[in-house]
Amino acid sequence: MYLSVGRRKQSRERGDTLVEVLIAIAVVSLILGGAYTTTNRSLQATRASEERSVALKLAESQIEQIKGLVASAPSTIFLAASPFCISAGLPVTTAGLNTTTGQPTGTFNAACAVDATGAPTTNEPVYRLSVARNTNDFVLTETWTDVGGRNADSMQLRYRLYD
């Protein structure tokens, strides 16, 4: 009788085998890896959307500045070399022109590479602005490096003046 009680005690205290533990670790690892991947993709998509929103805001700001220049000093905007940009980072007159040259800023200038606030920068993300003019049509092109740092994203807005 003593032997049967000892055997029963041993069978109740049996633990998990090494194979069961390894399978459990593998399942938990797969679940955590999937959650990490999903979270990372969601974060990148959110960041890309944020950068596109900032780019749109900057592009609309350029278009509004062009509208203001056309209304206040139309000759200066039509004499500007194409392509150009209008930068708040340089000393500008109330008409939005460079105080040194009296013209919109040329795209070769560092002021055409701006941050999210519109100030000149070299820190990523850098939004590069360029406005091309063809008679009464203005085409604003904006490029920046995507959130992954591998590809360039871009956006174009068009503005047409009507007589």
Image (cartoon, rainbow, N blue to C red):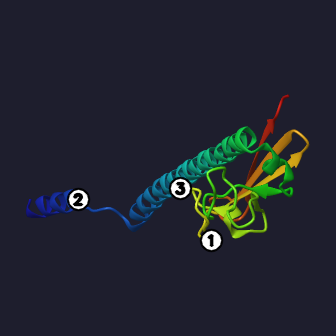
Tell me what residue is drawn at x 15 percent, y 60 percent.
9
Tell me what residue is drawn at x 39 percent, y 68 percent.
18
The part of the image, by quadrant, that contains residue 68 is top right
Is 125 rendered above or below residue 60?
below
**Marks 2 and 1, how far apart at CA:** 70 Å
Tell me what residue is drawn at x 85 percent, y 28 percent.
163
Task: Look at discs 2 and 1 and give the one toward the viewer.
Answer: 1
Q: Earlier in the sequence, mark 3 or mark 2?
A: 2
**Marks 3 and 1, how far apart at CA:** 26 Å
- Mark number displayed over residue 40: 3
Judging by the rendered image, the residue that carries numbered circle 1 is 122
The front one of 157 and 51 is 157
Q: Quadrant of the N terminus?
A: bottom left
Asked if disc 2 and disc 1 are in contact, CB closer than 8 Å, the reply is no
Judging by the rendered image, the residue that carries numbered circle 2 is 11
Asked if disc 3 and disc 2 are in contact, CB closer than 8 Å, the reply is no
Q: Earlier in the sequence, mark 2 or mark 1?
A: 2
Asked if disc 3 and disc 1 are in contact, CB closer than 8 Å, the reply is no
Task: Look at discs 3 and 1 and give the one toward the viewer.
Answer: 1
